[in-house]
Image (cartoon, helix red, strand yellow):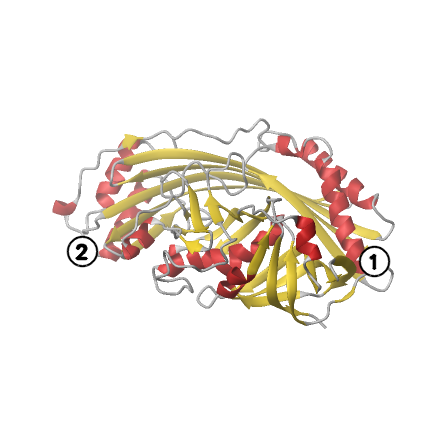
Amino acid sequence: MILEQSLLQELLGCAMSSGADFAEVFAEHTRQGTITMLGRDVDEIVNEQLSGVGIRLLLGTQSVYASTSDISREGLFRCALQAAEALGVIREDQRQHIVLHETVYPNIHAVRINPASAGNKEQIDLLRAAYEGAKAYSKEIVQVQGRLLSVDRQIQIANSEGLLTEDRHIRARIMVNAVASNGSENQSGSASTGARRGLEIFAGEVPETLGREAARRAVTMLHADYCPAGKMTVAIENGFGGVIFHEACGHSLEATSVATGRSQFCGKLGQQIANPKVTAIDDGTEPGSWGSNNIDDEGHPTQKLVLIENGILKNYLVDRLGGRRMNMAPTGCGRRQNYHYEPTSRMSNTYIAAGTDDNKEIIESMEYGLYAASMGGGSVNPVTGEFNFAVNEGYLVRNGKICETVRGATLIGKGSEILMNIDRVGTDLASAQGMCGSSSGSIPTNVGQPLIRVSSITVGGR
């Protein structure tokens, strides 16, 4: 236990002394390690520790948040009083007696090798294996960078409703970037994998496979022509292809946007917002998945939440404060990067569910278009849903066949429109890992989908 129960009870009572109707204490101790290698050599080893407490007060839909790294008794009560003063006038007769009851949630995320307790040599060997896999792919590979990230995060949550609970998050991820060159031009490719598990996820040939895939993408793009521009049919591959739904649609379903009227999907529960082939899910309960948690950062158990079912909007992602504004119950999605941030509604493992369309038929149905084999990053406006995403690896499709490789493609559109234009959904659901940034910081999330076809979308190119 990070803080003693008796101290937490006193702290909550003190925090509520200016009239708050809800108080919450979030304590955290996190160890994070990063090993970066350039080629076969170690470039950097960073080990960090983060400890502190955040105190949140609510009064109706008013919110006050304060945090401190001073977890002495004096430091904690100073932080609580500062939060209380920011909300209103402190009165001793309003100080409440809070009784906490510990709730223990089962841990469904098994870890065999905690990176924090493993030696650096074992992790360096994994990155060297990734380097060897990339270099062996082609003589055109001139540079390989590998990074291994490990996190061991312990959190404790107590609130004025009597909740006292804890959780521990252990995660590991390897990212590989390869650069291919023909002497006059360079192109890069990347690959990664991660989970809410330990180093056991990199057993066998996983690092070499990541290295080869990063190298393959770099070499493939080195020999690609530029993509033509225009409106066309686009097939988006599974796995990280799901980043488009995550960014262009998922953020617009978070209470952070919906509760304040800044979402393209405000007031549309029960309405058709997507093609009937589209079912989209956010599932924070997947054992071992990168974006999973036993509980969210407000102490609610995570859920498997159907957001869109056969094209019909069924649910929003709702945190505690958003729920007050929307008169809806929280859905276990209140998340934050660390104790410096107030929690907001966030995605976890978000994906378009598998459909029934045959992958071969999806490509054969395209007279002319783009096959986006690998997606990159992009930007989106959650209010309008307008987005712009890079295609890291693309191919033109002619008469139902995947043809020449193209680069420099971007997908440009609006979330509400792309949902309606998804007219084929394959069966091969896969997920990929990423970090998602929003008002409550950067958090680990999974994105996913099967191969899908978008009947019409604007493709930027040359």
Type of the residue with mark 2: Val
Viewer-proximal residue, 413 or 126?
A: 413
Give the residue at the far top of this rendering: 112
Pair 2/1: label in front: 1
Q: Secondary structure at mark 1?
A: strand
Q: Can you identify the residue that label 2 sits on?
A: 89
* Mark 2 crowdedness (10 Å alpha carbons): few <14, some 14-19, many ≥20: few
Left or right: residue 106 versus residue 247 is left
The quarter of the rendered structure image containing the C terminus is: bottom right
Which residue is painted at 36% across and 40% down in the image? Answer: 300
Name the image quarter holding residue 332.
top left
Q: Secondary structure at mark 2?
A: loop
Q: Can you identify the residue that label 1 sits on?
A: 181
How far apart, in angstroms, are the residues tagged by discs 2 and 1? 66 Å
Left or right: residue 175 versus residue 285 is right
Residue 196 x/y as whole percent: 54, 37
Name the image quarter holding residue 87.
bottom left
Left or right: residue 371 versus residue 78 is right
Residue 50 sits above or below residue 397 on the image: above
Type of the residue with mark 1: Ser
Residue 419 sits above or below residue 359 on the image: below
For the image shown, how many numbered marks are present on the structure?
2
User: Do we see residue 23 in this rendering?
Assistant: yes
